[in-house]
């Protein structure tokens, strides 16, 4: 499939107004996306667990207007008009304009809220942009009733990707691959696809507790971090390694080899941060408490024959991953030994989820 498939060729049956509400989750990558080329094409394939509790809920109200040259929208976040998010969303609309010509025919009022605190350091772009993409494709489906739902799901992921790469992995679940990979059937650089194999029962309902180590603004955004992979001395090896890791992880997810899962997932997290440490300009997003927590996790794992492990995204927070059958013990360990390394002792208990949900009869205000 190439991007042309997502252009609108059918005639549109315009309606006067419509409103859609979608809940879309955040996700946590196991094999990381770090490095891209225009337009939002990843340098390697990545895979993530879709989360369940960390999500955005967005309502978009569409009102038909005379066709306009610019996209007309207002953005409200948690009940208040928000100008800060507008530039990112305006850029997103520009990028998707060729694929969604109907956005020039409607005034859009966007109301959005997150289930997690905005300043928690949890990336809200994946859930936020995938929610907008779902609302847009819902409108498209009304304007072109013949569209089939498989195409609509792919297009939503395609649009979300143009807003933020990782957002392409927030439409479906429980595991989504984004990026063309020879061993993952149907995989594409253009959109995320569900992991195509049956996963071993040990990975079902996997748990992710997000330790909120640092709630401040990141000193270096993901966008800048991706750019620093150009002219990076290790980038080519890194892209190759990530693709090889996805081959390995695909087998692990099917055969339940949890020891190798732990090794691969932690290595991916540390390699992501190693890319930051070895770029120029170099930067460090981990905090002292990130390292304290990692050491504690390793100690707990060896002393308790546990299968707990960690991963990191582009920030200081630690995602603690473990099988559901260890939930009781690990939650106690986190409360007793890790919570005090978190900002105000805060952490979020989450688990693997199944992707975007349409909410009928609900409107975010
Ligand atoms: C470290 O998707 O936030 O979380 O495409 O520039 O919006 P943009 O970047 P973004 O990068 C996410 C990077 C990561 C790894 C991952 O989620 O795969």
Image (cartoon, helix red, strand yellow):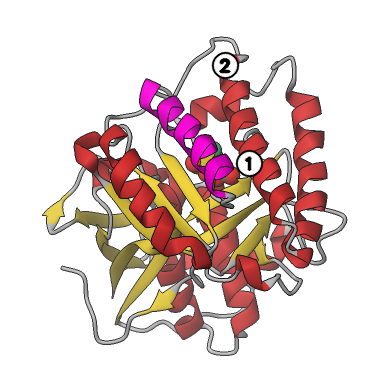
Name the foreground residue: 81 vs 167: 167
Name the foreground residue: 289 vs 159: 289
Q: Earlier in the sequence, mark 2 or mark 1?
A: 1
Name the foreground residue: 68 vs 27: 27
Question: In the image, 198: left or right of 6?
Answer: right
Question: In the image, 80: left or right of 276?
Answer: left
List x then y, in percent, for residue 41: 67, 43
Magenta span: chief secondary structure: helix
Q: Which residue is tagged 2? A: 277
Dot in front, 2 or 1: 2
- Identity of the residue drawn at 29% across and 36% down: 342
Question: In the image, 364: left or right of 165?
Answer: left
Does residue 109 appear anywhere in the picture?
yes
Question: In the image, 6: left or right of 17?
Answer: right
User: Any magenta on residue 193?
Assistant: no
| Mark 2 C-beta closer than 8 Å to ligand 1 | no
Q: Give above or below for 52 relative to 97.
A: below
- Most distant residue in the left direction: 80
Q: Which segment did they paint magenta? A: 288-304
Name the foreground residue: 169 vs 299: 299
Q: Which residue is tagged 1? A: 33
């Amino acid at each position: 499939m190439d991007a042309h498939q997502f252009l609108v060729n059918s005639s549109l049956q315009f309606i006067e107004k419509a409103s859609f509400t979608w809940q879309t989750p955040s996700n946590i990558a196991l094999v990381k996306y770090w490095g891209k080329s225009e337009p939002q094409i990843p340098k390697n394939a990545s895979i993530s667990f879709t989360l369940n509790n960390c999500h955005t809920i967005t309502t978009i109200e569409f009102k038909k207007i005379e066709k306009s040259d610019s996209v007309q929208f207002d953005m409200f976040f948690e009940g208040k008009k928000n100008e800060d998010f507008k530039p990112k969303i305006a850029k997103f609309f520009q990028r998707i304009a060729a694929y969604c010509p109907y956005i020039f025919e409607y005034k859009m009022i966007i109301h959005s809220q997150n289930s997690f605190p905005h300043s928690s350091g949890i990336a809200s772009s994946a859930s936020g942009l995938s929610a907008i993409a779902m609302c847009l494709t819902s409108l498209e489906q009304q304007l072109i009733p013949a569209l089939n739902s498989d195409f609509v799901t792919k297009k939503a992921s395609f649009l979300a990707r143009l807003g933020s790469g990782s957002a392409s992995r927030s439409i479906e679940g429980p595991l989504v691959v984004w990026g063309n990979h020879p061993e993952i059937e149907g995989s594409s650089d253009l959109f995320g696809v569900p992991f195509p194999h049956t996963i071993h029962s040990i990975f079902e309902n996997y748990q992710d507790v997000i330790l909120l180590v640092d709630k401040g603004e990141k000193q270096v955004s993901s966008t800048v971090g991706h750019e620093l992979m150009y002219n990076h001395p290790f980038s080519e090896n890194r892209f190759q390694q990530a693709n090889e890791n996805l081959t390995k992880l695909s087998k692990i997810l099917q055969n339940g080899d949890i020891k190798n899962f732990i090794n691969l997932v932690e290595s991916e997290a540390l390699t992501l941060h190693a890319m930051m440490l070895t770029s120029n300009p170099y930067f460090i997003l981990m905090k002292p408490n990130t390292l304290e927590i990692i050491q504690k996790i390793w100690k707990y794992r060896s002393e308790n024959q546990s299968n707990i492990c960690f991963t990191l995204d582009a920030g200081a927070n630690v995602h603690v991953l473990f099988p559901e059958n260890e939930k009781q013990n690990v939650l106690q360990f986190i409360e007793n030994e890790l919570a005090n390394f978190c900002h105000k002792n805060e952490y979020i208990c989450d688990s693997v989820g199944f992707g975007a949900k349409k909410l009928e009869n609900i409107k975010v205000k």
